[in-house]
Image (cartoon, helix red, strand yellow):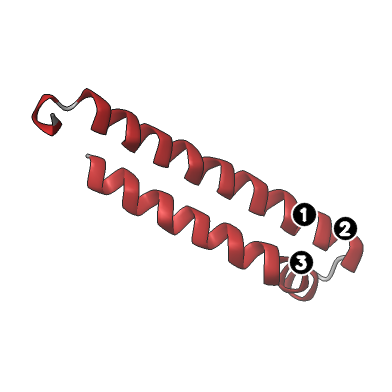
Amino acid sequence: MKILLKGMSQILIGIAGLLFLFGGKAISEFAKMDRLLAEMLGIGLAFVFGACGMMAKSAADDLDCEDPDAQ
């Protein structure tokens, strides 16, 4: 379970980075919406994906602490 959560956190944080860099332009082009609104939406989605990634990483770290074999 720890490996799954750590892998998922890396993927989510990677998606957040890509959304931060390229999300606004992609949303603007594909949805045919105003560029400023699309940039704000891209940054918002990057924040959400980054927060989910950090929660997954925190949960994986908590599982490491509870593992009796780790000591």
Q: Is residue 26 left or right of residue 35?
A: left
Picture quarter containing residue 21?
bottom right
Picture quarter containing residue 18?
bottom right
Q: CA distance from mark 3 to mark 1?
A: 7 Å
Residue beneath disc 1: 41
Q: Are marks 3 and 2 in contact (CB under 8 Å)?
A: no
Label 1 secondary element: helix
Instruction: Kindly identify the amino acid type of the residue bearing the numbered disc 1.
Output: Leu
Residue drawn where x is 82% and y is 55% of the image? 40
Q: Are marks 1 and 2 in contact (CB under 8 Å)?
A: yes
Residue drawn where x is 67% and y is 51% of the image? 45
Residue beneath disc 2: 37
User: Is 17 in front, or is 29?
Assistant: 17
How dense is the environment of label 2, judged by Cα within 10 Å: few (below 14), some, or many (20 and up)? few
Q: Is residue 13 above or below residue 27?
A: above
Label 2 secondary element: helix
Residue beneath disc 3: 24
Q: CA distance from mark 1 to mark 2?
A: 6 Å
Label 3 secondary element: helix
Q: Is residue 11 above or below residue 48?
A: below
